[in-house]
Amino acid sequence: MNDAEDDAGNDAEDELWDQLGEAGHRPPGPEHTALLERIVQHSDLDAMPELAVAARRALADVYCADGRWAAVFRMFDECLAAHDRQPWRFTRLEEDGLLGWYVFVADAMADFPRVPLPRIEHALHDVERRLRAGGRDLAPLHAARRRLAQAVGDEAGERAAFAAWRPRPGSAADLTALVERAVLRGADGAAYDLAEPVLTGRERVDGSCVPVACLVLLPALRLGFPQAAAGLARFVRRSLPYDTHRYEHLARYMEFCALTGNADAAYDLLGLLDDFETFERPAGRLEYAVAVAVLTGSMLRAGHTADVGETPLWLLHERMRDTATELAAKFDARNGGPACGDRVRARLDAAPLEFLPLTPGAVRPVDPRPPAGLSDAELLDRARRHDQRCEPDEARACLAAVREAPGALAAHLVELRAMLHQGPGTADALRWAIACHRQYGDETRALLATCWLGLLPGEPAGTTAGAAAALRARPDDRAAAWGDHWLAYDLMRAGRDADAFAALRRGAARAAADPLIAGSFALLAAAWGGDADPAAAADALVTAGAGRKAVEALDLLADPAAYAADRLCRDLPPVVHGHLLYLRARELAAAGRAAETADDLAEAAGVARAHRLDSTAAERLLVAAHHAAGRWVETVDAAVAVAGRLDGDAAAEVRLLCADAQRRCGLPWAALAEYAQLPGHPAAEAAAAELRRELGLPG
């Protein structure tokens, strides 16, 4: 190669080094990964091994976070081979980095049950030989040996490696390993004592405290520190969006939420299931599967019936439990002992704990399941009442509790299931139920089901009107009224507004003594723009115990503040009380009373979540209220909880407030991460540019 070619090669290498330095200042994301991949592509392992290894190590860190472990192992093997071909090209510092990577890779092999123990031991022996040859510290090697022994259940080997290991003061990774060791040994007090100085800020470590916090959530609770446990859970929750966390640590948080009655606080982490089949690290798959099984088990015990995506909750629970036990069996087969399976079974079978409020205003989730001891007929009757009061979770829970429904009961069960679980077979199921009702002599129930059937797409015109007319000719006033209720829907859909209102008036008059009918009909008339009084509707529905319907009426009030002021001192259904607090909070916010607004909204959101109602509007306003009150940490907590459920201007507003609060908390990197969620947003881009200048970062 001539001098000109040498100069060109040096210039190219210098440019790649500059690009690698630039990559170190970029936030994680597709652009950062693409830049590293371009550098790796153009850095030859033989021509420029120092650069090539440095670039591949940086890219490997990204791939680890993304779960692309096959590529990580491949790149390491390439780099080690390049070093062994030209060891003189590497400085001692560069060799230190490569050997540290070697220890990391050998340690990670334990997370793959297909990698036999002799191969892992060979890697550890090889790296030990290299460390000793250079007179280097063996502490990282002892840490890897200790974790391997812990994983396989080799108690003597673990104690020996622990005795030889010297944890580094201020190392987040070493502190995490120490705390995990104590937790796995059942030493809750030791685990908490190790973690507490760092988690309270009295001592600092060189990395994230989130893994440590996740590990001591349950120990803190078992030690009798519920407020500390709740505070740690809030810390974990607000930290999750701003870093990449191993599934092992997410799993501990999910299990804590599940066991303390806070499944809703971890429900969004089920979104990781979308990529579950691509998880390349079996140990991570195992831990996440355990956590999902515990979380879904908690939800099933609490009476949840909704699907997760397109998968029934019960089926997801069984799949994840089976996945966890199957993976544990693979690890035990590789390890030659039952240690992994024993740990997994203990976590899967952990008993639920007392409810722990994690946030101000949080209340125990309402159990929708019916009381024990009801007959199947009583369960079906209860399900119908819940349906009429717009309480679908409770109605479905009653249906799920039915043991056997022979004869006439079968018609009620099929009818209710068809209405509460609508799908392609709903119309056919209703026709069967109608025929069965008639077979057992219940013409009134058959006609009411026919009214409902007539509202489905594709049913003959006049189906509902005919059934409603037949009901009016019968002596059952309540049934006749409900027939007119469904007829009003049919008429309004046909554009016959006046006839729809007439049907509502007629039905309400027929069963005027029934507060549920009076309130339901007035609510419908008010919602459609009629002259019905929503306040009267709400009062009637409260009397009927139909709190969720009453909430719909409250949203139609012309002067909600006056209604709230008059009613909040009364004994109301919790959902009504919570919604009145929300309505009052809007008035307080307009008056600039931020702290009072936040307190009302926190309680309102807690009640809504406990009853599985949409709390998004209250939580969005809560972010602004906390921010206006100067409650920066609470602003972040509230924003992290709701931001993922918002879009457009609402999402931008919440993220901007969250970013500002993060800056005021002294967390500029978290603020930049929030601004990055709003590409193209002028205010976010301007604020991010200003913050980058303050931090001395390139724009």
Image (cartoon, grey):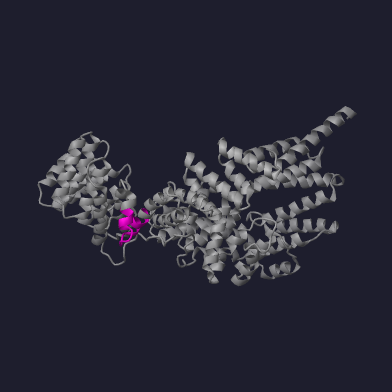
Q: Nearer the viewer, residue 204 or 300?
A: 204
Q: Position of residue 552 (x, y in %)?
A: 31, 48
**Residue 611 visible in rendering:** yes
Residue nearer the viewer, 158 or 333: 158
Specify the quadrant that holds the N terminus.
top right
Q: What is the magenta segment's predominant secondary structure?
A: helix
Residue 406 image position (x, y, % from top left): 23, 57
Q: Percent position (x, y) of residue 389?
A: 27, 53
Measuring from the top left, give residue 287's x and y in whole percent: 56, 57
Is 86 placed left or right of 261 in the picture?
Answer: right
Q: Is residue 577 magenta?
A: yes
Give the residues drawn in magenta, as a range: 563-579
Q: Nearer the viewer, residue 444 or 243?
A: 243
Determine the image quadrant of residue 117. bottom right
Q: Is residue 47 above or below residue 363?
A: above
Q: Which residue is found at the position 75% from the left and 35% from the top?
A: 42
Q: Which residue reaches farthest right?
A: 3
Check the image and name the residue furthest to the front: 591
Quarter of image, res 600: bottom left
Does 422 lie within the magenta span? no
Image quadrant containing the C terminus: top right
